[in-house]
Amino acid sequence: MKRNHKFKMTLYIIAVLWVAFLAQVAVHFLIQDDGRIIEAFANTNSNVVESKVEVAADYGSRYLNHEDKEKLIRYLASSIGINTDYEIEQKKGSKSLEYKAEKKSRNGEVCIELISIEKETEHGTREIKHYILVNLGIYENSNSIIEYKEIIEDAMKELNVLDYQSIVRFNGVYNGRLTLDEKIQITNELFQNLEAKVISESREDDLFIVYGYTGLIKEYIETNGNKVNINVVITYNEQADKTNIYLASPILNEDY
């Protein structure tokens, strides 16, 4: 793996690769308690910086006018308790139109996007495809992130999206630089608390990434014949002299 390992679930990439992605990575659902991930992360004894949920959805090629798009944004905002103090901005590209609403506070931030992209079909005609992305981050707290995840997913279902993918991520910090043995111990305890098994790993001092699977979390992706729904990444910020630990499910989709 490379240092700048990525799994980008940004809306633009979904717009281009959504069909190919779903063909290669099957998303499955089990009836389990994915709230266990909060308890497991708390047991790392790191200082929680942020917990985050990202939900990306394929909204199909249905007709949407300006009023429909703003109504959709406002519905999603209202679903997560945001009713005032935000504006919906438009950004037009050569073949795309983005509607975006953002709100930040001392406790967290929310970004809701609806992007409509003009695409050519296999028959040589053109159609407009719509994609939704909701990002919600909570600072210095992780207790309610699973609840927000379920709220956003329920809202997506109410909108009758064609498909969606959810990612939950926790970020904590330790003062100073952890040794490799300390990183291994923290990760092993995380996996033990989540009753998870290791699927693949790179346990090196400058590149510490572990992927795993647990039946305690309801979603998982399947790739290369393996189920994956736990991803631990540990990095060191030399300038701040802090070690960052990321716990994501099913996998981390950000640069680090």
Image: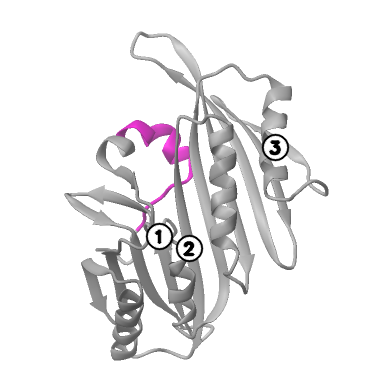
Q: Amino acid at mark 3?
A: Tyr
The local secondary structure at tag 2 comes to strand
Badge 2: few (under 14), some or many (20 or more) residues near its Cα, within 10 Å?
A: many
Along the line of sight, the residue nearer the viewer: 191 or 176: 191
Kind of residue at badge 2: Arg
What's the CA distance linking mark 3 and mark 1? 27 Å
Tell me which segment is drawn in magenta: 6-20
The quadrant of the rendering that contains the N terminus is bottom left
Q: Position of residue 113 (x, y in %)?
A: 61, 40
Q: Quadrant for residue 250, please give it.
A: bottom left
The answer to if 173 sits in the magenta stretch is no
The image position of residue 161, as x and y in percent, is 51, 31
9 in the magenta segment: yes
Q: Amino acid at mark 1?
A: Leu
Task: Give above or below for 125 relative to 30.
Answer: above
> Residues under labels 3 and 2: Cα distance?
24 Å
Q: Position of residue 208 (x, y in %)?
A: 31, 75
> Where residue 75 is drawn, which disc sits there?
3
**Residue lying at 54% horizontally and 83% vertically, measured from the top left:** 240
Ranked by sequence position, the earlier of labels 3 and 1 is: 3
Residue 149, compared with residue 189, is above or below; it is: above
